[in-house]
Amino acid sequence: MSLEIIRDARAYCSQVRQFTYELAWRPERHLVAGTQFELRSHCLRAFHSWRFVWMEVDGADVTFRWKIDPSPAEMWANRAHVLLRAKLPYGARRGQPIILRLRAIPPIWAGVDTTLSVWTLDLPNAFEPASPAPEAGCEGSACTLTVAAGAVERVSVYSSPMPGANGRVRTLLVPEDRFGNPSRLQQPAACRLSWGGRSREVTLQGSVTVQLTAPLATARAVLSIPQDALAPGENIANAQSAGANLLVTGNPVWPVPSDGLRAAFGEFHWHTEFSADGQRSITQALAAARDDLNLDFAAPGDHNPTAEQWQATTAALEDANQPDEFATFFGWENGTDRGHENYYFSVANHPLVCGGSADITGGRPDTLTERLRGLYASNNFLAVPHHTNAVAETRRIEDDTPYWYPYPWGAPEPYIRLAEIMQCRGNQEREEYDDAWRGWHQHNQASIQQALALGHHIGFSGGTDNHCGYPGRAWAEEGLGLHSPKSVILTGAWVPHLERHAVLDALAARHTWAVWDTRALVQFSINGALAGDELIVRPGAALNAQLRLSAEDSLQAVELVSEGTIIWSASYSQMDIELEIPLAPAKNSTYIYLRALQRNGGIIYASPVFITVK
């Protein structure tokens, strides 16, 4: 192999730690004096995520080093992903080792490895300055710098929000590094898991899955970890100290409600290696959704997948789909310079597949409305706009214009049933808010409230838009670093049962809520109409909101919002509330939705109830 690692730093996920590598490149042919060569990264996501602090080459003159913190425009301009360029003043003989030393800060995503390769820029024998220097990849000149999870710094207890079809509550106990990558304790720890007034011993080192009995009332699993079982380099930062033990409390779990609907959590806006700017496979991504975060449903949103990529996508989704356990469905993203929206459907050969029989492979959402409206008349699908009020951070070098602009909300369309109210680029609910609500893009006149004011009847979803094949996990580096080191955004849905068509029907019915850094459970209704429903009343009719909410911390703020105005608010020291809230009598057609803020920063949104007065 012509490029190999002779000193492997064995990097782990970090935002600051530097790891030093030594590589040896052995050319497979003689190189004349003055030959230049380049070291390149294999894909955009790895190129973006790995930061190289310092690079040098023995016996060569380095003529170019990639910046540690390039601007987005510079990143896009370096389309060959060149990290280093050097000239060999005396050439090199075949097989003669050329030593490269690199110091890098790896990404926060375990498995987002970078493959490096060597390319030569050969001088013609005549040494004519006007002659172009052809480039060539050196055969076998590839090596991979890997990044693994760091030491355990937290343990998460992820319970299904309600019992499954088997009457049990699937619960994952997951040791994680500070960024949420599943990790392992150095030694097995004898822990105790408390649930429903009983406890059991659990040996924890890597991830553990347990099945718990159905609760009779709201319950939260509690894992007790002996402090002396941890190595000096390990910690459980999300635990509470209780004498010799550390206690980690899981998310709230409800019994099956009387109306027969089951709460489910999922994420359906994430990217894989099938997106030009993504990484990790769809198989890895789906496994992470089910076995790392204990999600109930998932679907990808890769950019304009090719026919071959779509075939692989559908095969992976079919393999992962398990009725009553884990539901998958189909989707892709249409991203343009004037708005991004994703399309979702329940059959793999839907006409709206990118390049399918509907012949939609891209195009601005506001120019596709007539075609999509006609398609929707005979084919069910769901369109979900995202980062509607954001402007691209990436700008073109030639004129400093952003690569994309806010979403072009127009007249309401029947196929737009949901909008992503929260994602990696922050909260998109309104035009202005304080930092607690994480609304980093403001005053772009394309917020969710703007869409509601235009008459759109849209429910709320939460997506990540991450490009690293980890459903649910938000980018820590987005939003100017305002995320916590480990951040998760999900969509909750009320489903009759956990099955592909039922999940999509629940999403289309807007029976949803969105959560950020919490798995709070929310049942919100007005006069019995569930969040997302249409409620028709007479003028002057009494309106009463019903609210049941179980959070993961005390509630700093619980608010009802109508037409951009808070019409009711309260604060609670407890995590579980159940309320009947009298509202003003019906006067005009309107909408009312719920939002809540936990003391620990978690954010909750329940879809609106749309009220028609006539």
Image (cartoon, rainbow, N blue to C red):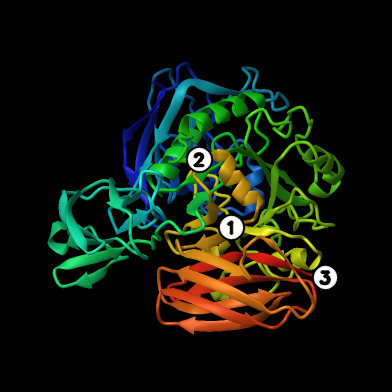
- Residue type pointed to by label 1: Thr
Q: What separation in Å lies between label 2 and label 3 (alpha carbons)?
A: 39 Å
Gap in Å between the C-alphas at discs 2 and 1? 16 Å
Image quarter (top left, top right, bottom left or bottom right) of the C terminus = bottom right
Q: From the top left corner, tell me how far across and down residue 130 is, in percent.
A: 73, 26
- Residue 569: x and y, percent? 58, 82
| Residue at the (38%, 34%) spot, across then down | 23
x, y percent for residue 495? 54, 50
Q: Is the residue 234 above or below the residue 36 in the image?
A: below
Q: Give the mark nearer the N terminus: 2 vs 3.
A: 2
Residue pointed to by mark 1: 512
Residue at 62% in and 23% down: 308
Asked if residue 606 lies left or right of residue 170, the reply is right
Q: Which of marks 2 and 3 is in front?
A: 3
Residue shown at 47%/16% (left/top)?
Answer: 29
The answer to whether the residues at label 2 and label 1 have Cβ atoms under 8 Å apart is: no
Task: Determine the CA span between mark 1 and mark 3.
Answer: 26 Å
130 to the left or right of 102: right
What's under tag 2, amino acid-wise?
Ala
Q: Is mark 2 on a helix, strand or loop?
A: strand
Amino acid marked by disc 3: Lys
Q: Which mark, residue 350?
A: none
Earlier along the polypeptide chain: callout 2 or callout 1?
2
Q: Give the label on residue 614, or none.
A: 3
Please, what secondary structure does the residue beneath circle 3 have?
loop
- Can you tell which mark lies on residue 327? 2
The one of 20 and 507 positioned closer to us in this rendering: 507
